Structure formats: C-alpha cells, structure tokens
C-alpha cells in the first residue's frame, strides 16, 4: 500500500473512534486508542512522504498505537459487544 493510501486508511479511524466512544457498545478506551491510531498512521505516512530517512523510526515508535484496529477486532471476536436491553422487554 502506498503512503498516500495510508493517509486515508488512517483518517477513517478518527470517526470510527468517535463512534466507539459515543456508542457505549465497546469500552471507551478502544475508541480513544482508535483515535490515537489515526494520528499515528498520519504521522507515519507524512514522515514517509516528507522525510523518508526517518520513516523506520516513526514506525517503530508508533507501532503500539497503530494496533488499535487489531485490538478492537480481537475484542469483538473474544468479548463481543454489549447487548442493549429494551425497557419494555424487562417487564
């Protein structure tokens, strides 16, 4: 994947993280992690475009932050999302 494509791949994590934070279906820390991952991918992409000599350093530093998507996927597979119960179904 080219660095220009990674800019857009990172940008979509910001609205996704906001939705996760606001929905309460998933833990809030996953939403924050996704938003941080957005900026980590953007930093990696722009460093690769503007300062290619430092691309490896930025990738090594940003790697833990970039794993937000993987952690969210694993959370959904292992724990699942919270089930929302309707008030009418309880009575």
Image (cartoon, grey):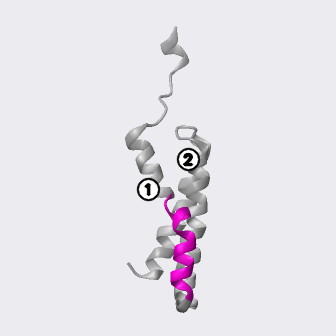
Please identify the quadrant where the N terminus is shown.
bottom left
Q: Position of residue 20 (x, y in %)?
A: 55, 47
Disc 2 element: helix
Give me the residue at 53% from left, 41% from top.
Answer: 26
Mark 2 vs mark 1, foreground winner is 1
Magenta extent: 54-67
Q: Position of residue 53 (x, y in %)?
A: 54, 91
Disc 1 element: helix
Whether residue 63 appears in magenta in the rendering, the answer is yes
Give me the residue at 59% from left, 76% from top.
Answer: 43
Q: Position of residue 56 (x, y in %)?
A: 51, 82
Q: In this orientation, which residue lies closer to the viewer: 31 or 85?
A: 31
Q: CA distance from mark 2 to mark 1?
A: 14 Å
Q: Position of residue 36 (x, y in %)?
A: 61, 61
Extreme residue toward the top, this view: 91
| Disc 2 target residue | 20
Vertical comparison of 49 with 70: above or below: below
| Disc 1 target residue | 70
């Amino acid at each position: 994947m080219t660095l220009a494509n990674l800019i857009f791949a990172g940008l979509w994590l910001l609205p996704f993280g906001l939705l996760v934070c606001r929905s309460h279906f998933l833990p809030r820390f996953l939403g924050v992690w996704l938003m941080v991952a957005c900026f980590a991918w953007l930093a990696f992409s722009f460093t690769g475009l503007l300062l290619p000599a430092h691309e490896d350093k930025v990738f090594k530093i940003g790697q833990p932050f970039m794993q937000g998507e993987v952690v969210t996927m694993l959370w959904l597979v292992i724990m699942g999302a919270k089930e929302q119960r309707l008030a009418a179904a309880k009575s």
